[in-house]
């Protein structure tokens, strides 16, 4: 238990407050006895009394904040269709193992199981807290991961898509960004490089090139490097999908 609480106390920042902190507090109170005696006083989970005033410093998001946000939203998506699929849970465990290593992933999955067992998750309040503290690039990465979860069992239900869409709206992710990331996961049946670059087939050559530069800048892995090297792989996957879409259009048009 000591190692677990040390990991929690050392890796989280703003997640200890707000609705996410409330979820953590519920889990710790239900599962882990004596947590408050082992976590530093500066990291105690306060009661949530509504949104805080003032602008947050989004550069202060820690890898742990991103990790917990991802776990909470992953639970929302997995439970959205009324059933918990083992392949989706395995996707979360496998990706966390690849990103963080087995030891840290095991701790994260212990926390994830507690989140999954919790009843209603205040999705909108959670997303408001995330968008107040997390950069746009990091929020895009969250949506990318959520689509990966929905595709893990090979069948993406409409409820899952609707849930990710709702989360995206709460996170202030535009419809174009949402459709672009979604298109990255449907290459086999409806691959559309134009949607990925957020343009239409009527776009001129100059507009295609401009769209590529804009998307490459928006999704560049360096945008989330402050979250730790473990999150760069997912960002690189998006970046490569954008490059492939551009190369596909170039080959199609011959320029």
Image (cartoon, rainbow, N blue to C red):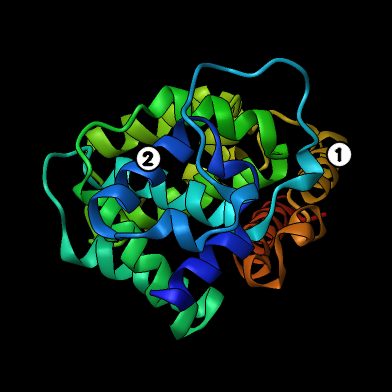
Q: Residue at x 45, y 75 (%)?
A: 2
Quadrant housing the C terminus = bottom right
Outermost residue, bottom direction? 102
**What's the mark number on residue 198?**
none
Element carrying mark 2? helix
The answer to whether residue 15 is above or below residue 128 is below
Outermost residue, front direction? 37
| Viewer-nearest residue: 69 or 172 | 69
| Earlier sequence position, callout 2 versus callout 1 | 2
Q: Which residue in the protein does label 2 denote?
A: 23
Looking at the image, can residue 184 be seen? no
Decide: few, some or many residues near mark 2? Use Cα within 10 Å; few <14, some 14-19, many ≥20.
many
* Location of residue 229 (image quadrant): bottom right
Looking at the image, can residue 123 be seen? yes
Q: CA distance from mark 2 to mark 1?
A: 43 Å
Q: Residue at x 76, y 29 (%)?
A: 56
Q: Residue at x 74, y 31 (%)?
A: 203
Closer to the observer: label 2 or label 1?
Answer: 2
Quadrant housing the N terminus = bottom left
Decide: few, some or many residues near mark 1? Use Cα within 10 Å; few <14, some 14-19, many ≥20.
few
| Viewer-nearest residue: 224 or 52 | 52
- Report x, y in % for residue 55: 78, 22
Q: Which residue in the protein does label 1 denote?
A: 210
Q: Is residue 239 left or right of residue 154?
A: right
* Location of residue 57 (image quadrant): top right
Q: Is residue 237 left or right of residue 192?
A: right
């Amino acid at each position: 238990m000591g190692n677990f609480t040390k990991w929690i106390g050392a890796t989280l920042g703003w997640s200890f407050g707000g609705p996410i902190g409330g979820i953590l507090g519920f889990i710790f109170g239900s599962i882990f006895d004596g947590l408050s005696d082992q976590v530093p006083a500066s990291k105690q989970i306060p009661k949530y009394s509504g949104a805080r005033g003032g602008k947050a410093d989004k550069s202060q998001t820690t890898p742990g904040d991103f990790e917990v946000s991802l776990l909470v939203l992953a639970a929302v998506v997995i439970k959205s269709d009324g059933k918990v699929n083992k392949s989706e849970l395995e996707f979360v465990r496998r990706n966390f193992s690849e990103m963080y290593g087995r030891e840290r992933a095991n701790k994260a999955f212990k926390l994830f199981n507690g989140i999954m067992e919790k009843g209603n998750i205040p999705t909108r309040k959670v997303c408001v807290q995330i968008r107040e503290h997390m950069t746009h690039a990091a929020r895009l990465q969250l949506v990318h991961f959520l689509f990966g979860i929905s595709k893990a069992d090979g069948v993406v239900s409409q409820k899952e898509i609707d849930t990710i869409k709702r989360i995206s709206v709460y996170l202030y992710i535009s419809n174009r960004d949402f459709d672009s990331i979604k298109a990255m996961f449907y290459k086999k049946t409806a691959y559309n490089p134009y949607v990925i670059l957020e343009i239409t087939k009527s776009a001129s050559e100059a507009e295609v090139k401009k769209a590529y530069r804009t998307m490459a800048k928006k999704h560049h892995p360096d945008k989330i490097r402050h979250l730790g090297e473990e999150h760069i792989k997912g960002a690189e996957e998006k970046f490569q999908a954008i490059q492939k879409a551009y190369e596909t259009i170039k080959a199609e048009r011959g320029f």
